[in-house]
Amino acid sequence: MQYSAIRWATLVVAVFLFGVRAKADAALSPCEAFCHDWFGSSAHLRPMALAETNTVVSEVTLGGQTYGWIFRTDQVPPTCKGKRGEIALAVALGTDGRIKGLHVLCHKEDAPYFKRLNASFFQQFQNQRADAGTAKIDAVTRATLSSNAIIRDVMEGAKHVIALPEVSIKIKSAQDCSLTKTAAMFHN
């Protein structure tokens, strides 16, 4: 009888802890969850107050220091559409002006074609310079409209974000930075 009570109590505690964990995960926005994946669990997102634009960009900080930015492609120019409409992605940029990762948030594309965009397609973006253009990324056959829309959306959106004055001033480089066309700025 005592063994059964211990099992019951353990089960109740496990269900409670699972519920607390599920609430904590639900409280994170998709961009916050990806922020932790791309920059580590200690990273924090902070919305930026952009002076000359209505673009929504979040700054990633660790210990008060800027480590990058995350933006949604549906919230920065240009608007790129696949076959059935806009495809929204979360994109992470590091302070070196390179893409750290991306994740599809939502789309209305035809499932059989969109499934052709596998991990190898999305891995092409990692470590690409935000000013690299679209030539270095291959589209996917039989998902051409969707893959071309994603390529253009990510690369042109990233180029737009690094050109923002609040972002470009924090881009790190050892030499003159071709991303911002200004002399490199070194940070502590």
Image: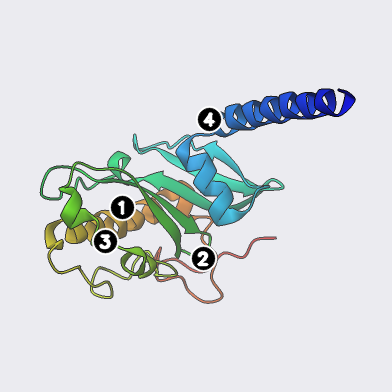
Tell me the distance, in whole angstroms, between the alpha carbons under discs 1 and 4.
27 Å
Q: Secondary structure at mark 3?
A: loop
Tell me which corner region of the image, top left, top right, bottom left or bottom right, holds residue 52.
top left
Percent position of residue 182, x then y: 44, 66
Give how far across and how far down residue 111 sits, in percent: 19, 49
Secondary element at tag 2: loop
Q: Residues at badges 3 and 2 in contact (C-beta under 8 Å)?
A: no
Q: Looking at the image, which residue is at 57% across and 64% down?
A: 185
Where does the image place residue 14, in percent across and percent down from the top left? 71, 31
Placement of the C terminus among the 4 image quadrants: bottom right
The mark found on residue 157 in the picture is: 1
- Write the residue at 22% across / 48% down: 78
Which residue position is annotated with label 3? 117
Dot 1 lies on which element? helix
Near-viewer residue (20 or 55): 20
Looking at the picture, does residue 99 appear above or below residue 132?
A: above
How far apart are the alpha carbons under marks 1 and 3? 20 Å
Instruction: For the residues labelled 4 and 3, say whether their Cβ atoms are less than 8 Å apart.
Output: no
Categorize mark 3 by other alpha carbons within 10 Å: few (<14), some (14-19), many (20+): some
Q: Residue 33 or 95: which is nearer the viewer?
A: 33
Amino acid tagged 4: Ala
* Callout 1–callout 3 Cβ contact below 8 Å: no
Q: How is the image coloured?
A: rainbow
Q: Name the amino acid, label 3.
A: Leu
Of the numbered discs 4 and 3, the one sitting upstream in the chain is 4
